[in-house]
Amino acid sequence: MKIPARPQVQLPPINKKHLEDAANTARRVRDAVKPKAEHLAKNAERVARPVAKVVTSSSAWGKSIGVDDGTTAPRRFDYGSHKQTLSEFDTSSADRSGARLRLFGEASKETLSAAIGLEGEAGAKSKYRNDEREQTSDAFAGLRGRVFAEAGVLGGSVGGEGFLGAEVFSQEGDERGAQTWQTYKSQLSVGLRGAAIASADVFGVRAHGLLEAGATYRGSTQINNHLAGPLGVLSTTDFFAFAGVRGEAGAGIGLTGLSAGAEVFAGVRAGLEQRFALSAGGSELLGGALRLEGWAGVGAKAEVKAGYDAEKGSVAVGADVGAAAGIGAGVSGGVTFNGAALASGGKDAVGGWSDGNE
């Protein structure tokens, strides 16, 4: 049997002029589209940059001030450093003992926000400084407090805090002006502390208040190891211990329901939190945390919740009331994400690497 020959496919000859015409047409299209694409990209950037700044700013959410509830890391009262001074009354002496009262406020077009408040302190104060060890200590006995209101395009808050008693704050090391650094801060407070804050934003309305009497110790160690540019790895170890009586109450209304609760505790409690995070300029960008806490004493709590269950299509209402005495412990963890610092940190990182490679 004779196998027929495979048919031959005849390809047309390549016309170089046709190829050149096609290439020229592609270049003309590219040259016509490129300016328009660049113009659209620039306009999108002009719009996105201020929007991103507003969304990631704590001022736009009305949460740039906050209150010290005695459980955060050690911090100075920082009289006069948070917002712009509008008016000030000062009768303190050279060692800063006496009375000071300050009216502060701030408005920003960039974050579409404004804040106003009053803060002050009255009592005795002393300072110690050792430049060789980069150590500073502040001791205070008396009354200090702050009330404020702030609002932004995405939310607002009102709050106040007060402390009556004695307090010592100390810091060793300095995180400014170096890429690798280590600091240790400690704070011992004995007296009566109260704080309350209410806030509202696009996700709901919340209120929280507390009152405590006793002694609180807080310590914090931070170590920042330089990676590249302004970026580093920040290790933070926070410790707190409290002995006394503490009461808290809170309520909130959100998109899917509401909750309210109160808790009273008398005894001793202590906790340790370890965080590791990518940092820029000493601010945490993204990381994780592990928290251990233990307590010994007596406590009571009451909680009410009501909300809509989308899966079941029903409204659920529940209540929880309880009391306990003895010793307990708990473990928790979480993820750290700082949108504002992440945005500015990324920009600084690009700038830092660019400066280093020029």
Image: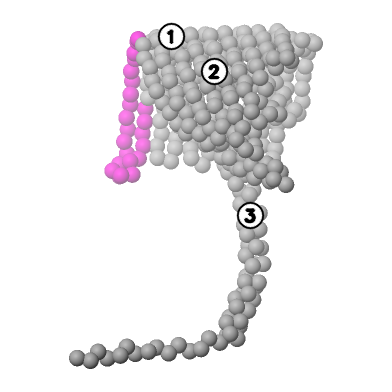
The answer to whether any part of residue 83 appears in the image is: yes
Specify the amino acid type for callout 2: Gly
Left-right relation of 185 to 270: right
**x then y, percent, for residue 30:** 62, 71
Separation (CA) of disc 2 from disc 1: 15 Å
Judging by the rendered image, the residue that carries numbered circle 2 is 70
* Element marked by disc 3: helix
Is 283 in front, or is 66?
283
Q: Is residue 163 above or below residue 117?
A: above
Main secondary structure found in the magenta portion: strand
Residue at 64 percent across and 37 percent down: it is 230
Task: Report the disc number at residue 240.
Answer: none
Give the alpha-carbon distance from disc 1 to disc 3, as whole Å: 55 Å
Quarter-of-image position of residue 284: top right
In the depicted view, which residue is nearer to us: 59 or 241?
241
Residue at (32%, 39%) from the top-left corner? 315
* Crowding near the residue tagged with mark 3, few <14, some 14–19, many ≥20 C-alpha atoms within 10 Å: few
Residues under numbered marks 1 and 3 in contact, where contact means CB atoms less than 8 Å apart: no
Q: Is residue 156 left or right of residue 289?
A: right
Does residue 194 appear left or right of residue 311 in this picture?
right
